[in-house]
Image (cartoon, grey):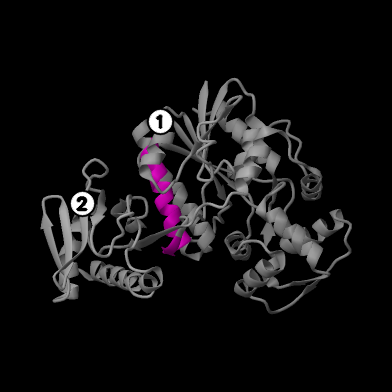
Amino acid sequence: MLRICVTGATGFIGKNLLKHLKGRSDYEIIALSRKITDQLDGAKKDNTIWRSCNGFSMIEAEKVTKDVDVLIYLIHSMIPPVSLSQGSFRDYDLYLADNFARACAKNGVKKIIYISGLIPDNLERSELSEHLKSRSEIESTLGQYGTSVTTLRAGLIVGKEGSSFKILERLVNRLPLFLCPKWTNSKCQTIDLSYVLISLDYCFDHIDNLEDVYDIGGPEILTYKNMLLKTAEVMGKKRKAISVPFLSPMLSRFWVSQITGCDTHLVYPLVESLKHDMVVRKDHQLLIENHQYKSFSQSIADSRASHDEGWIWRITDFKLDINIPVLKNVSSLQRMFASKKMSALEVSNLYFSWLPKFFKPFILVERKDHDVFFKGLGIKLLHLRKSDKRGDDNRVVYYVVSGFLASRKSFNGRLEFRWMPAQNCFLIALLDFRPALPWIFYKFTQAIIHLFVMNKFHQYLKSRK
């Protein structure tokens, strides 16, 4: 029996995959989501077990990947559920991928399968959109500790409840006329959701003989303007498209979000990627024999006609209506580069020696064995304690113990230093920190100072001879 762990199981691809694999006696599915309530954690139905998992916790990632054969990685553009978050979605994506890469390596997971985006061959990484840069980084990060990774690269995936389908449908419903700037002539090879699921079936059946990367796509190459007009035709709406010389992608992100009512974190990556042609590379294309490919119009029609079926849909729809509690916690994540080769342990030691010099004479840093004390004006501001169990030379973890600036409820607050070998950079993360100061005061003082200090330390790290 193949044990398959599905991250993001309540998302678009995730819950459709669960429905697709429902009742398969040769597979045991571990479905992960941070939206799982305590009552549903561990619930089992047919061949699926639900597990609650916060991907930002290495401990939880290790726990849920134990005895797993295959990990399906569907996490992207995720920001932690906290009241204040500092850092880009790319850096958070990188942190999450590193968590699961380390967990899979530790637990001996045989294969990670990652659903990524089509990446143009003729562009350097620096020329890609932020969305595609992140996807490319995740590909290399997932395999950086030795676990075998196969990536399925897809363009716009069409299916019920998919963000792309929602955006197209709402634009057609709410706009009588499409103003189409130059970038809407970019080419895109769309793919029906059913073919993504069939491609995953292929991977499961050939798990020991897979290539590193496959491109998957449907039979048509369309422009985004064509997609809007074809969607309108399927919906029985008469719409016209007029080419205009203005409307930059940045402005378009704003008005698409406002008109459709879709979250900006769904709209922005899609619109930002429109400047690239998203077309399958023939020499990397995965073709399934005897599969009947759907046209784009047929995919849209089927998406509009489909309806929820079965227990998986009822449970996942219920959970999607649950608001994840937003804690009065803080997460701050910065990517840093050093001028010379160093370990994460060396960077952490450098930080604790640099900080009092930078703040001299206001801040003192005292170190004793595994403990670090930050003091100012005779007050113990913070007390951190290094964890030997949860780290090594390339991942150093300090837990927040106490201090004037830390709430007593900051149970899992921690400062982490990580080396990211695939990206040749460090991540320095303050996670799950709960401040003691009144929230408004903290937000406009301590939080700003922390980000300022991290930026200054990065400058110092890059400038060292």
At mark 1, the secondary structure is: loop
- Magenta span dominant secondary structure: helix
The answer to whether residue 6 is seen in the rendering is yes
First in sequence: mark 2 vs mark 1:
1
Label 2 secondary element:
strand
Q: Residue at x 24, y 64 (%)?
A: 404
User: Quick check: 139 above or below 406?
Assistant: above
Q: Which mark is residue 186?
A: none
Query: Most extreme residue toward the left, as rendered?
Result: 368
The magenta-colored residue range is 83-104
Would you name the residue on which mark 2 appears? 385
Residue type, mark 1 in image: Lys
Q: Residue at x 38, y 37 (%)?
A: 62
**Labelled disc at residue 66:** 1
- Kindly identify the residue that appears in the image at 51 percent across and 62 percent down: 130
Q: Nearer the viewer, residue 271 or 392?
A: 392
Tell me if 247 is positioned left or right of 127 in this view. Answer: right
Residue 288 screen position, x and y as percent: 67, 34
Instruction: Examine the rendering and report whether any part of residue 281 can be seen.
Output: no
x then y, percent, for residue 286: 62, 39
In the drawing, does residue 129 fall left or right of residue 173?
left
- Could you tell me the amino acid type at mark 2? Arg
Q: CA distance from mark 2 to mark 1?
A: 28 Å
Image quadrant holding the C terminus, namely bottom left
Give neighbour class at mark 2: few <14, some 14-19, many 20+ (Cα, 10 Å).
many
Q: Position of residue 16 (x, y in %)?
A: 65, 39
Front in this rendered view, residue 15 or 279: 15
In this rendered view, identify the residue nearer to me: 201 or 449: 449
Which sits in the foreground, 166 or 54? Answer: 54
For the image, the number of numbered tags is 2
How far across and how far down the image is residue 252, in percent? 65, 71
Report if residue 138 lies within the magenta region. no
